[in-house]
Image: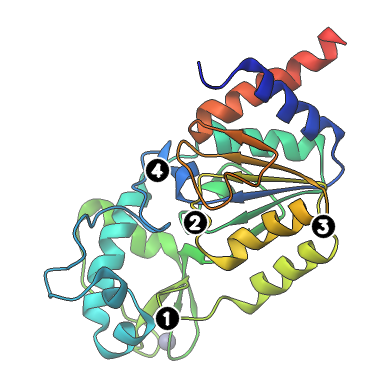
Amino acid sequence: MENSKLIYKRVADEILKADKILFITGAGISADSGMPTYRGIGGLYNNDQTEEGISIEDAISGNMLKRRPDITWKYLWQLGKACADAEPNHAHKIITEIQKLKPDTWVLTQNVDNLHRMAGNTNLIEIHGNAFELYCTKCYAEFDSENITSNYRNGNVKLPPKCGECGGIVRPKVVLFGEMLPEKAINKYYDILRSMPDLVISIGTSSLFPYIQEPVMIAVQQGAATVEINPGETSISQIVKYKVTAGAAEAMTNIRQEINSFGTER
Ligand SMILES: [Zn+2]
């Protein structure tokens, strides 16, 4: 087996040793919940073009939402349906357990699927927003996502959804292509970087975005311990201290087992 028991033991040891931990997660952690993986928003598009003959990036962009909200919502809806029934998996839940053990543990996620919150994760930075928070683009009224997402299941859909108060287009609080990152999340992100964690664990992200790669780079420079959990090779695989070649749920389950056995073995 490629992943010897030893690497899980070493990662568990680093977790027990650390005061401040940062988890960085991407689509790979949601893959074990049955979510499709494609740049963190879903893998429904194997070819680049949509039915409209435009790229999925253009369809789900801030500009398209302004010009043709019906097109953007058509694809948001497909993605939303894919996350509507997903449940957090062991990887999400073990992060919650680690947070109980180490309260100064943070989670920086690219995912908008709400699974970290459902698993009870705290200290959460949703850098691309959350698909289950909705608001009116005209009067900024906020909407309970259940009013809209309940329709993911019954197929009773009239898109784009409109605000009952003012008739404005309702949208999710997610960062669409071409949009800025949310200011609150960015501020929290820089807070974390200023007082760098002594352990950074990247799970299931290809680390393409600079703000996802940066904390790992800084941790390496400052001599903090770094872990990558990913079945594939990424831009950070060569620089992390521990590279775990496995899926998120499997790896985290093994790490938890090692954490639990520390008390009895030593
Ligand atoms: Zn409104």
Separation (CA) of disc 2 from disc 3: 22 Å
Q: Which mark is residue 178?
A: 1
- Work out whether mark 2 precedes mark 1 in sequence or the reverse, and give the earlier one: 2
**Which label is found at residue 196?**
3
Say which of 143 and 216 sits in front.
Answer: 216
Give the secondary structure at mark 1: loop
x 74%, y 18%: residue = 260
Camera-nearest residue between 237 and 173: 237
Q: Earlier in the sequence, mark 2 or mark 4?
A: 4
> In the figure, 192 relative to 16: above or below?
below
Q: For the residue carrying disc 1, how many other residues have a C-alpha within 10 Å: few (<14), some (14-19), or many (20+)? A: few
Q: Please tell me how crowded label 3 is: few (under 14), some (14-19), or many (20+) other residues with Cα within 10 Å.
A: some
Between circles 2 and 3, the one closer to the viewer is 3
Q: Quadrant of residue 238?
A: top right
Q: Secondary structure at mark 4?
A: loop
Q: Amino acid at mark 4?
A: Ala
Point out the frontmost of discs 4 and 3: 3
Front tag of 4 and 1 = 1
- Spatial separation of the CA atoms under disc 4 and disc 1: 27 Å
Marks 4/1 in contact by CB < 8 Å: the verdict is no
